[in-house]
Image (cartoon, rainbow, N blue to C red):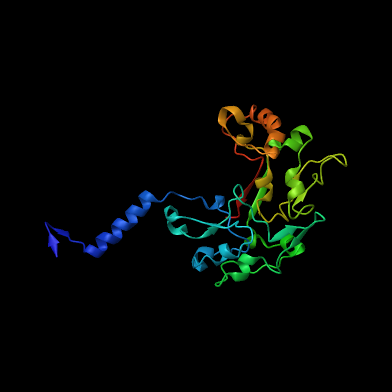
């Protein structure tokens, strides 16, 4: 059927077109490189994930979140935000200070019903040598804003890394750093992208806030490094991306 030489569209076609246009207007763009999936996410993750939520329920540390409706095609798919809650690799620290696995396999992949998240043995050697396609991402250290590199202090990222001395080293192996001097260095061949280093890094803008003027309830950890962080940020301006060590997704 035509009107004035133009074809009419059906109600169904109109609603389909309106829905596509609406999604383009409402849903913001997400950069895949900024998305950190749970460990074991396969390359065709979006095609295999059925949005069942079992990975989130199985996570012992509530580290897995889901995209909301404004995420478009990514809606209700799992991701990890290291600045909010990193992936603890299903490990816990014992009374002796050593970290041990809480399960035989990483729980998110163990419960995934479709294989969108592969099952990974909760073993340090296995985690340090995952194939690239199963890693969450990579950590990158900005030495210019690292307290340890600039003031010979801190080292929180190294001390708290679940794969310490493999993914995060006390000093670069190929640079003349004296023994006993802490200069954190990421070994990207073993980094799994869990985000613990970014989560614990004190170099954040909120660490510089005045308690009185901004009414920020800073804890002792933030207060400890506040003066040093202020000194670092005074050099940079407002555009630098913090913390000093960040994690990007693998895609």
Tell me what residue is drawn at x 42 percent, y 55 percent. Answer: 69
Q: What percent of the width, then of the height, locates residue 42?
A: 58, 65
Could one spot residue 79 in this view of the protein?
A: yes
Could one spot residue 210 in this view of the protein?
A: no
Q: What percent of the width, then of the height, locates residue 57?
A: 57, 64
Q: Quadrant of the C terminus?
A: bottom right
Quarter-of-image position of residue 163: bottom right
Q: Is residue 175 left or right of residue 15?
A: right
* Residue farthest left in this picture: 4
The residue nearer to you, when weighing 182 against 17, is 182
Q: What percent of the width, then of the height, locates residue 243?
A: 64, 40
Q: Quadrant of the N terminus?
A: bottom left
Residue 21 lies, with reference to residue 120, above or below; the image says above
The residue nearer to you, when weighing 75 against 219, is 219
Q: What percent of the width, then of the height, locates residue 204?
A: 63, 37
Tell me what residue is drawn at x 77 percent, y 54 percent. Answer: 166
Quarter-of-image position of residue 146: top right
Residue 226 lies, with reference to residue 134, above or below; the image says above
Q: Is residue 172 left or right of residue 112?
A: right
Q: Is residue 73 left or right of residue 223?
A: left
């Amino acid at each position: 059927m035509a009107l004035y030489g133009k074809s009419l569209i059906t109600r169904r076609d109109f609603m389909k077109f309106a829905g596509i246009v609406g999604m383009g207007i409402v849903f913001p763009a997400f950069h895949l490189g900024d998305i950190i999936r749970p460990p074991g996410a396969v390359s065709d993750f979006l095609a295999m994930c059925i949005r069942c939520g079992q990975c989130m329920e199985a996570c012992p540390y509530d580290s897995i979140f889901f995209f909301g409706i404004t995420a478009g095609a990514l809606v209700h798919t799992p991701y990890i935000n290291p600045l909010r809650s990193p992936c603890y690799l299903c490990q816990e620290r014992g009374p002796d200070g050593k970290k041990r696995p809480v399960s035989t396999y990483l729980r998110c992949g163990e419960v995934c019903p479709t294989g969108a998240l592969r099952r990974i043995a909760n073993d340090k050697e296995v985690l340090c040598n995952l194939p690239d396609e199963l890693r969450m991402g990579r950590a990158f250290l900005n030495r210019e804003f690292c307290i340890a590199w600039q003031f010979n202090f801190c080292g929180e990222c190294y001390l708290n890394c679940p794969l310490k001395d493999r993914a995060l080293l006390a000093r670069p192996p190929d640079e003349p750093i004296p023994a006993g001097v802490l200069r954190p260095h990421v070994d990207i061949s073993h980094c799994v992208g869990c985000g613990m280093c970014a989560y614990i890094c004190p170099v954040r803008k909120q660490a510089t806030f005045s308690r009185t003027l901004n009414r920020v309830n800073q804890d002792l950890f933030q207060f400890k490094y506040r003066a040093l962080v202020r000194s670092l940020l005074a050099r940079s301006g407002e555009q630098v991306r913090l913390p000093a060590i960040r994690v990007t997704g693998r895609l």
